[in-house]
Amino acid sequence: QQQYLLPNHRSIATTYNNLAHGYFAQGKYDECLIYYQKTLELERSSLADDHPTIALTYHNLSTAYVGMKQYKQGLEYAQKAVEQCRK
């Protein structure tokens, strides 16, 4: 996809998100976080600041951190998800 689409194309973010979901389902949270972060970067550069999809990605990051038992980071991203929903 990257060779045919612009670097911040929404389809690339969707692909990263799908990869993250797969890693999450396997309990591979380290790999999952990498792709959720890439998803977030692309979403923040290509979507409106108040887009609800960004809140969902923050939530996904939160659940991945909780899966790793890193509750402080999980809480931080959960709070970001709530803040994003309020925009």
Image: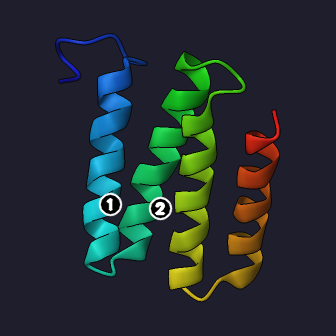
Near-viewer residue (60 or 7): 60
Q: Secondary structure at mark 2?
A: helix
Q: Residue at x 17, y 11 (%)?
A: 4
Figure check: 13 above or below 18: above
Which circle, 1 or 2, is nearer the viewer? 1
Q: Residue at x 25, y 12 (%)?
A: 5
Near-viewer residue (59 or 35): 59
Image quadrant occupied by the N terminus: top left
- Residue 33's label in the rendered image is 2
Task: Read off the residue under disc 1.
Answer: 21
Q: Residue at x 81, y 32 (%)?
A: 87
Q: Residue at x 25, y 78 (%)?
A: 26
Q: Amino acid at mark 2?
A: Leu
- Left or right of 22? Residue 76 is right
Label whose residue precedes the other's in the sequence (1 or 2): 1
Q: How dense is the environment of label 1, judged by Cα within 10 Å: few (below 14), some, or many (20 and up)? A: many
Q: Which x, y percent locates residue 57?
A: 54, 49
Mark pair 1, 2: CA separation: 10 Å
